[in-house]
Image (tube, rainbow, N blue to C red):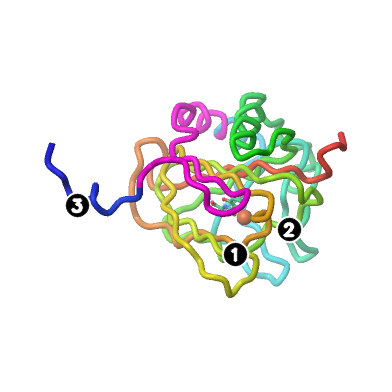
């Protein structure tokens, strides 16, 4: 078997600790990808993607929706979780049971044994869409990790530290990759570089990201 350049330069696709409480699971959702995308389509039929506004009046380049008991929302009033979709006034679509089980299995691999997600934020990236460096701090459950699943076109995930000025590391996220984020890394800055022009058999030109979140303390209903 000849060695090609890709083999020499690509990172090993094995689980890797990105920091205390932060675990990269390459291919962690590989076997579930098709099923997840089908279930995403079902969520979209009830809660379509929308381009939210930041509190400062800028439009997110990423389109978003949610499923679960709570959904993340942003407008002039601020970032927050809502129990009903502000577009329809109806409850967010339920989170599929398999998603909850899967997110729990991923969290357990990173040492978070009691994780029970209440919200799944669904992000859709078109070519050029990006997510600036931010902290996920709209949840009141600092003990709970976030479980993040990537589907479709590959992206560069930017993983910084607890302050904006810390070194930012780039991690290539391919379809089916999972990142678990908690403990001492729970509030690390992170973002996604502008999505390139590419094609993936499952999603065409798009990248999807599912983030599973606990919003209220783990011992609350
Ligand atoms: C994304 N992800 O991958 C954006 N947040 O599209 C996030 O903002 C994120 O992947 C917290 C933990 C993991 C993440
Ligand atoms: Fe985030």
- Residue 10 % position (x, y): 30, 51
Q: Secondary structure at mark 2?
A: loop
- Sequence-wise, the earlier of marks 3 and 2 is 3
- Residue 106 % position (x, y): 59, 35
**45 vs 25, nearest the viewer:** 25
- Residue 108 % position (x, y): 64, 34
- Sequence-wise, the earlier of marks 3 and 1 is 3
Contact, CB < 8 Å: mark 3 with mark 2? no
Residue behind mark 1: 161
**206 vs 112, nearest the viewer:** 112
Mark closer to the observer (1, 2) = 1
Name of the residue lying farthest toward the bottom:
165
What's the CA distance linking mark 3 and mark 2?
A: 40 Å
Q: Secondary structure at mark 1?
A: loop
Q: Is residue 181 above or below residue 97?
A: below
Membership of 212 in magenta stretch:
no
Dividing the image into 4 quarters, which one contains the N terminus? top left
Residue at point 46%, 47% (across, down): 207
Q: Is residue 175 above or below residue 164?
A: above
Residue behind mark 3: 5
Q: Please give the label number shown on residue 139.
A: none
Q: Secondary structure at mark 3?
A: helix
Q: Is residue 25 above or below residue 173?
A: above
Residue at point 74%, 42% (across, down): 214
> Label 2 crowding class (10 Å Cα cut-off): few <14, some 14-19, many 20+?
some
Image: magenta residue range:
12-40
Residue behind mark 2: 137
The residue carrying mark 3 has its beta carbon less than 8 Å from ligand 1 = no
């Amino acid at each position: 078997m000849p060695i090609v350049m890709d083999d020499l330069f690509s990172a090993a696709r094995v689980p890797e600790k990105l920091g205390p409480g932060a675990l990269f699971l390459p291919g962690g959702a590989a076997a579930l990808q098709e099923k997840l995308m089908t279930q995403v389509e079902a969520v979209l039929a009830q809660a379509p993607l929308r381009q939210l506004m930041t509190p400062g009046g800028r439009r997110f380049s990423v389109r978003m929706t949610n499923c679960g008991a709570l959904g993340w929302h942003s407008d002039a009033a601020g970032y927050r979780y809502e129990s009903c979709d502000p577009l329809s006034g109806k409850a967010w679509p339920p989170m599929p049971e398999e998603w909850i089980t899967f997110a729990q299995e991923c969290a357990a691999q990173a040492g978070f044994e009691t994780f029970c997600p209440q919200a799944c934020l669904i992000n859709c990236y078109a070519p050029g869409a990006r997510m600036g460096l931010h902290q996920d701090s709209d949840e009141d459950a600092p003990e709970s990790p976030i479980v993040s699943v990537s589907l479709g076109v590959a992206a560069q995930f930017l993983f910084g530290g607890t302050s904006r000025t810390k070194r930012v590391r780039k991690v290539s996220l391919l379809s089916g990759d999972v990142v678990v984020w908690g403990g001492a890394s729970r509030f690390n800055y992170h973002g996604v570089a502008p999505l390139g022009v590419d094609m993936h058999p499952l999603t065409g030109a798009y990248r999807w990201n599912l983030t599973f979140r606990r919003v209220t303390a783990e011992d609350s209903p």
